[in-house]
Image: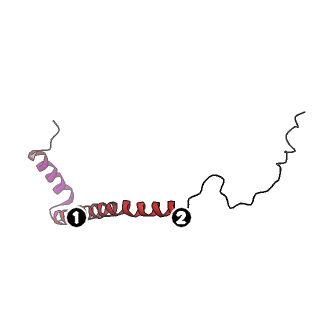
C-alpha cells in the first residue's frame, strides 16, 4: 500500500524546514493557499463557460444552416459551353 501517513508527512515537513527555514514557511504556505484558491476559481469559471458554450454554438449552427442551404447543382458561377483543352505535355492517344 502506498499511502502517506502522519510519519511520512512529518519527515517531509522537517525536510522543508531544513531547506527553506522556519521564517519562510508562512510565506510558502500563503503562496500555496493562494495558488489553490486561484485554481479552484479558474475551474469554476471554466465550468460556467462550458455550460454557456453549447447553447451559443447550437444557435449559431441553426442560423448558419438556415442561411446557407445549398443543394447540388445550385451555384453562383456562370455556366459555359467550353470544352476542356488537352495538356500539351501528355501524349495524345490515337
Q: Which mark is residue 67?
A: 2
**Does dot 2 land on a helix, a strand or a loop?**
helix
Mark 1 neighbour density, 10 Å: few (under 14) some (14–19) many (20 or more): few
Q: Position of residue 29 (x, y in %)?
A: 18, 62
Q: Which mark is residue 29?
A: none
Q: Looking at the rendered structure, which numbered label has been put on residue 37?
A: 1
Name the one closer to the observer, 34 or 54: 54
Q: Is residue 24 magenta?
A: yes
Task: Please state which of the two labelled residues, at mark 1 or mark 2, is closer to the viewer.
Answer: 2
Q: Magenta segment, principal secondary structure?
A: helix
Tell me which colouring the rendered structure shows.
secondary structure
Quadrant occupied by the C terminus: top right
Q: Earlier in the sequence, mark 1 or mark 2?
A: 1
- How far, Cα to Cα, is label 1 from label 2? 45 Å
Q: In the displayed structure, would residue 70 be above or below residue 86? A: below
Residue appearing at x 85%, y 48% in the figure:
85
Q: Tell whether position 71 is magenta.
A: no
Residue bounds of the magenta highlight: 9-25
Report which quarter residue 90 is drawn in. Answer: top right
Helix, strand or loop under label 1: helix
Say whether residue 28 is left or right of residue 82.
left
Q: Residues within 10 Å of mark 2 (few under 14, many from 20)?
A: few
Residue 16 in picture, x, y percent from top left: 18, 55
Amino acid at each position: 500500500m502506498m499511502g502517506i501517513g502522519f510519519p511520512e508527512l512529518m519527515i517531509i515537513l522537517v525536510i522543508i524546514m531544513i531547506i527553506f527555514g522556519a521564517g519562510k514557511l508562512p510565506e510558502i504556505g500563503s503562496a500555496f493557499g493562494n495558488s489553490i484558491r486561484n485554481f479552484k476559481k479558474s475551474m469554476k469559471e471554466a465550468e460556467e463557460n462550458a455550460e454557456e458554450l453549447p447553447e451559443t454554438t447550437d444557435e449559431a449552427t441553426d442560423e448558419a444552416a438556415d442561411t446557407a442551404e445549398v443543394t447540388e447543382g445550385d451555384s453562383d458561377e456562370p455556366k459555359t459551353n467550353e470544352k476542356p483543352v488537352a495538356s500539351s505535355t501528355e501524349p495524345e492517344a490515337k
